[in-house]
Amino acid sequence: MLAPADWPRATAAFLDERLSRLEHACREAGVPFHDDAGVDDHLQRVLLASDFAYESFLGDPRLLGPEFLQLMTDPRHADARAGVLADLRDDELRAELRRFRRREALRLIWRDVNRADSVETTLAGASVLADACLEAALRGAERQVAVRHGVVRDAGGQPQRLVVLALGKLGGGELNFSSDIDVVFAFAEHGDSDGARPLDASAYYARVGQALVSLLADRDADGYVFRVDLRLRPFGNAGRLALSFAAMEQYFQREGRDWERYAWIKARPCAGDRTAGARLLDTLRPFVFRRYLDYGAFAGLREMKALIDAEVARKDLADHLKLGPGGIREIEFIVQLVQLIRGGREPTLRVRGLLPALAACEQLGSIPLARAQTLREAYRFLRRLENRVQMFADQQTHEIPADPAIRERIALALGRPGWDALAGEMNVHRAAVAEEFGALMAVRARSSAQQSQAQWTELWRTLAGGDDVDPKVLADAGFDPPQDAAAELEALLGSVTFRNMSARSRERLDRVMPALFAAASGQPEAVRCLTRLLKLVQAVARRSVYLALLDEQPAALKRLSAVFSASAFLADRVISHPLLLDDLFDDRVEQGAPARHEIEGELSRRLGAFGEADPEAEIELVQEVRQSALFRIGLAFLGGRIDAVAAARALAEVAEVVLATVLRIAERDLVASHGRLGERAHDGSGLAIVAYGSFGGAELGFGSDLDLVFLYDGDLAQAESDGPRPLDGQRYYARLAQRIVHLLGVLTRAGRLYEVDVRLRPDGSKGMLVLSLSAYEAYQRERAWTWELQALVRARAVAGDVSLARRFAQLREDVLATPRDADAVRKDVVEMRARWRAERDRSDAQRFDLKQGSGGLVDIEFLLQALVLIQGARYPELRGDGNSSDLIARLAAVGVLDAADADALARAHADLLERAIRCTLDARARVVARDADVERSAGIVQDVAGRMGLRQG
């Protein structure tokens, strides 16, 4: 901030003259003029920034008195001082409202110019001032109307107040200094007033609204309080002044337009019956925030932007801080678009202010950190500059003044050495915003894509315009053999959905289809890709929002076609669960697999938005998040951003997060019915869930089931729960485990979370579903077969009671540390592997079973497990987790495997695992042609096993 001593001489002289005039006016009015250095500097900055402030002080010198200077130091907003407006009537209220607004406006200028408040505080202060004036004016209007017409009462006989809803900047709590206020009037119930001249509710509240507007907006000798804009109400100026809640809901269901969704994002009750207003907004929320991802919001945004651009060009508004290129409105559009698209699924996006909404977008990753910071800095800069432009003369303007002297004063008051410096800074911010907005709208991508699609547009017209789909037309276009694609296209064109499409949806489809042909033609598997894309179009044809995504986002379509070409599994997931299209639009898919904390955070955030327990809806949501995570892992693997080992680990982490979430839901439901067990010395539920098999070894596949064992704290077996229907400990934990298995397997719209296999528990399917840790220990020490000890190598606790999990880990380590007869272990392992291969190996002379074939993935598992059982007593390092790649590294570290064998085995494992995952992703059995690479990998496994005395034939 520049000190007054640093201002140009002409400016200093100009301000000295104004100070002298104010001092003289104060003397004439008998008002003490404080001219000490601190007040003097502060006042000079105010006079530099605002002619409105100077004229206000000159017209009423009392505004420079001790009370006003004390007001300048009060950090509280205007509502803390609005008591002066209470109980005033008619002309007294009208006059005091104008004086109150002027005093508070001067306070906002003083504190902003002297940097006592941040720009956010200034905007919030202007909003609170408007709220206070609206409430006072509403009470005054209610008293006026009640004299003749009484009051309208609700069904319970209680007086019913008007609801004043704030929209726009006021709704967001970020009102400009000289802005008008956008409001909408509503009332809860119909009825008649009870006065001498009764009115129906609609007419009654129209009178109240008119009186309110008059109190605020009529000009007199004291000016006005706020300009009031009612044009955002349903049907605009043609609509009734006040509508019932039922009429509002009906309007938005039937008539609501895209631009109104943007307007109502920030809606909030600001005066009158705010509780009823909140109920109304809850009712209207589905209009603003659609249940599904809503990419149709792009079309509404593009239409609004086109209208704004036309106005900017027509009125030459290039310097307009709000509407011009890179202006405030473009920042708002960027953030509001994310809110409208994702707000139905992400409650944290349903916030009103721009900066809180931007922070929510940033936290969710919808707007990357660097972009969010660019937008935040530009917004703060432009909003402060906009406010200073309005503070100068208390005028609602968003344009930079043409007068060079005024520009210079604004720049100096903002702490810049002159206008050129401020203008340069402004241009940098606006250029950055314009670039971000241009990228969002993908204008260049759309136009170039459209130019290259002329041939595909003609193809679509030919195919769609004929009576039947001619496969030869597709073959000539490069989709050969064409039969499958032709059949899918025939199904689409013959569907009821296609025949009954609205004009808007058909127009969108006519743009999308050529783009699909073009995208598919550029893929290695063009026919497969097109066939799958046509299946997707059939699946989403009823939901035009998904067509909108493909229409509006060429980058998403490019990703989609690449995925559909490479992976039948992922394509099927998208076709059956179109919400996954959102992940193709999300730039985070280029960053690799989702981190565990991201998945946990999303589940916690979205489940936390449920008002009350709803297990069915909660499991649907868990499935939605799980599907998204698996899809992103698949994309990262196919894109080469993670390898097979990392993909398998990531899939296991997703399962752990899901399992922990399901456990919490199941335990909550159990507690509701049966209460909790007695007090325990440790923290947790008393139940631990142990993962076996590929889940335990953190090598999960995309279609893997979960091998689970449930253990409980035996000390609680005889305890009794404290609920209305008490259970003993054993039955309590059996019921909990059953509930977990049920929730994991319940059929949602997108399938089951996981198939669960509990046969690896002691005594298999004949044993108890839930076992105490002590009984489990006795079984492992006294009765376990060698194959069960092998399974224990990969076992680990993945959810539940932390203390019990630690006890299980110690037990596992103790069992694996037991010395064993090496020859006996080798004999049992080889025999068991031979039996498995005879039952399960699908290999033949031409094909190799990646999992069960000789030298395949199961052979690696058996080899590693046998070495742990043989060497675990000697080497504690081998008793850690049972992940295959980790075990290979640890066996090499302790010298059980030499470095060359370990390196070769690790490469063979990675190669076989990658091939297996690719088979799953392309919906193929994990059986591949016997090429040189496969034979080499299998040979390595066989050779290492032979050297370890475990050749398995």
Image: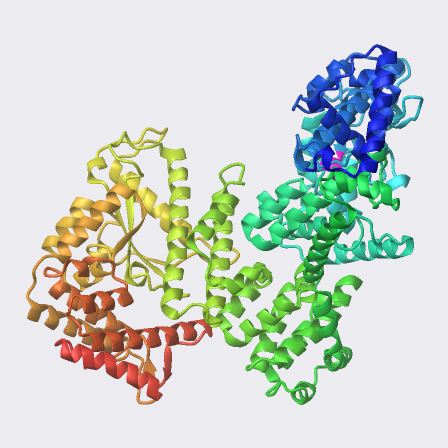
Return the x and y of residue 868 as percentages of the image width and height.
Answer: 16, 64
In which quadrant will I find the C terminus?
bottom left
Lateral position of residue 38 relative to residue 876, left or right: right
User: Which contiguous range is marked in magenta?
Assistant: 166-171
Q: How many marks?
A: 0
Q: Is residue 167 one of those drawn in magenta?
A: yes
Residue positioned 49% across, 71% down in the render:
639
Work out whether residue 621 or residue 192 is closer to the camera in this orientation and state it.
621
Return the x and y of residue 302 as percentages of the image width and height.
Answer: 77, 58
Lateral position of residue 677 relative to residue 135, left or right: left
Residue positioned 46% across, 52% down in the render:
599
Work out whether residue 16 or residue 515 is closer to the camera in this orientation and state it.
16
Work out whether residue 207 or residue 94 is closer to the camera in this orientation and state it.
94
Return the x and y of residue 235 as percentages of the image width and height.
Answer: 86, 42
Return the x and y of residue 322 as percentages of the image width and height.
Answer: 79, 47
Compared with 601, 77 (above or below) is above
- Direction front: furthest residue: 9
Q: Report if residue 519 is visible in the image.
A: yes
Q: Report if residue 178 is visible in the image.
A: no
Lateral position of residue 477 relative to residue 761, left or right: right
Compared with 815, 566 (above or below) is below
Compared with 455, 421 (above or below) is above
Q: Picture quarter containing residue 951?
A: bottom left
Residue positioned 59% across, 49% down in the render:
361
Q: Is residue 698 one of those drawn in magenta?
A: no
Q: How is the image coloured?
A: rainbow
Work out whether residue 634 or residue 402 is closer to the camera in this orientation and state it.
402
In which quadrant will I find the N terminus?
top right
Lateral position of residue 29 relative to residue 920, left or right: right
> Which SS does the magenta portion mostly show?
helix
Q: Picture quarter containing residue 652?
A: bottom left
